[in-house]
Amino acid sequence: MTGSDWVFLGIFSGGLLAVIASAEVFRKAMNWSSEATRKIVHMLVGVLIAATPFLLDSMWPMLFLGGLFAIINYIAIKKHYLNGMHSIHRQTFGTVFYPVSFFILTAWLWHQDQLVLVTAVLIMAIPDALASIVGDNIRQPIPIHFGPEKKSVQGSLAMFVSSFLIVLLCLHLFPQLGPAPTSVLNTLWIAGVVALLATAGEMVSVRGSDNLTVPLTSAFAMFYLLHQSSAEATQFTIGMILALIIAVASYKLRFLTGGGSVALLILGTLVFGIGGWAFAAPILGFFVISSLLSKLGKKRKNKLLTVFEKSGCRDAGQVLANGGVAGITILAWYFSQNDFAYFLYVASLAAVTADTWGTEIGVLAKTPPRSVLTFRNVPLGTSGGITLIGSAGALTGAALIALISLLTTSGHISFSAKEFLFITLAGFLGSIVDSIVGATIQGQYQCPKCQKITERKTHCSHHQTKFIRGWKWMNNDAVNAFCAAAGSGLMCLLSLV
């Protein structure tokens, strides 16, 4: 960095610290709640950060600050410092995600499109805070249950309207920062799409994750609509509408919870809107057939409801655990335009399909499962338990995803018998990795009343279970995400053969 960059860095850092310190002083003097203080700091800091592209030529001071404040805020949360920002009614890492998201946005957009950068930061700063303020202070909130945190219709509406207005204002006021739409209709179109996806990102937030999901989702949607052709932008919008229809239908059919439907909207927009049919067909195959499989043998599966951590309708965590790696590989394909990223995408879906099929079919086996480690008989529902019929189902599921991909690439991607075999093997072996993780490091608990081993933290009429082995954070969703990542990783290894 140049000398002027260091000077700016010092002045800007001082300004941020002054805002934070002033908020702490006013909180104590005026007896404000920590939640109110945090929202004020949230908005003021965001507005200051959004102004930096107008004041600074180099991005390096802001990258430095983003990394520094992420570390400082994490330490403050752990050490209970700066209570005006961190001491609120729920545990949150929002003040850590906030600078992390700005770091990512700056590294990506400072030289690519500062219009999108400024807009995304302002959406993170103002609408995200307004949604919380409206939701917390409305007299008669209409609750919506999309996850572990309380949301309201009024708060989500405030999020959508304010995001829509900020996109309109930024496109109108700062066209010199990036490619601006050529018509009023295009401006309204972009604002509507971005606002809807930003609102979806806020709905499924957990522990402040909206400070990551809202700006990144908004930024990508706006960047794509501004930089791609009209035909591609139209496909993106149609993809979002299709994802919305499927999400609503899945909620009505009880395939997904409310949170799972919103997560599907975001993921489906990426899949359908960017990848087209070649990307959409495999994930639709996984989702539809796996959802139908979950309905088979329902009476027998109901006996395992107290063993498995999650069952029945898939929530947002399950959607993202199974499809998050696929979403990342789609973005990798978009930015790199490398066809191998497509095979990583399909391999991750083959792995989660194999795992899902292995479980859904395996629990119907008449013979007891065996441990994937010792091959000794284990109780039905035991993590790491496998059956012959379940393994056959896992292999079939992986092969089906590979076949769907082979049939739908339509010559756009070179797909040979070798890729078909590798995807099938990567998917099947990924499900085996899932079983090994489940048998070794997945968190396991024991009910003090019935002594049954379970993945749940409560059992037998909400009795608190005792943690007995594994890693507490390695829950069912983490294991599924590990499985998806293993599928892509194994595809990389097999491709070296």
Image (cartoon, rainbow, N blue to C red):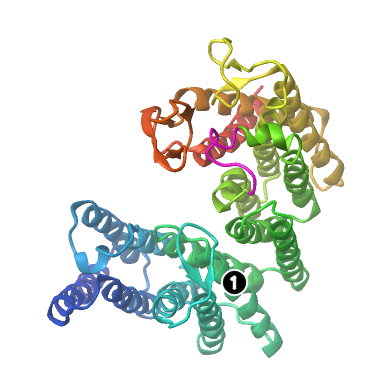
Q: Nearer the viewer, residue 432 or 330?
A: 432
Tell me which corner region of the image, top left, top right, bottom left or bottom right, holds residue 271: bottom right
Residue at 46% x, 37% y: name it: 459
Residue at 79% x, 48% y: name it: 281
Q: Nearer the viewer, residue 313 or 447?
A: 447
Residue at 59% x, 72% y: name it: 222
**As drawn, is 81 to the left or to the right of 165?**
left
Quarter of the image where the C terminus is located: top right
Q: Quick check: 336 above or below 209?
A: above
Q: How many marks?
A: 1
Tell me which corner region of the image, top left, top right, bottom left or bottom right, holds residue 96: bottom left
**As drawn, is 3 to the left or to the right of 39?**
left
Q: Quick check: 407 above or below 255?
A: above
Q: Quick check: 323 above or below 192?
A: above
Q: Amino acid at mark 1?
A: Met
Is the residue marked by circle 1 packed among few (<14), some (14-19), or many (20+) residues within 10 Å?
Answer: many
Residue at 74% x, 55% y: name it: 253
Q: Position of residue 31 (x, y in %)?
A: 17, 78
Quarter of the image where the N terminus is located: bottom left
Is residue 397 a member of the stretch shown in magenta? no
**As drawn, is 8 to the left or to the right of 166?**
left
**Residue 109: in sight, yes or no?**
no
**Residue 64: in sight, yes or no?**
yes
Q: Position of residue 366 (x, y in %)?
A: 72, 19
Residues drawn in magenta = 304-313
Q: Nearer the viewer, residue 313 or 12?
A: 313
Q: Which residue is mark 1?
A: 222
Q: Position of residue 20 (x, y in %)?
A: 21, 72
Q: Position of residue 432 (x, y in %)?
A: 61, 24
Under tag 1, what secondary structure? helix
What secondary structure characterizes most of the magenta part?
Answer: loop
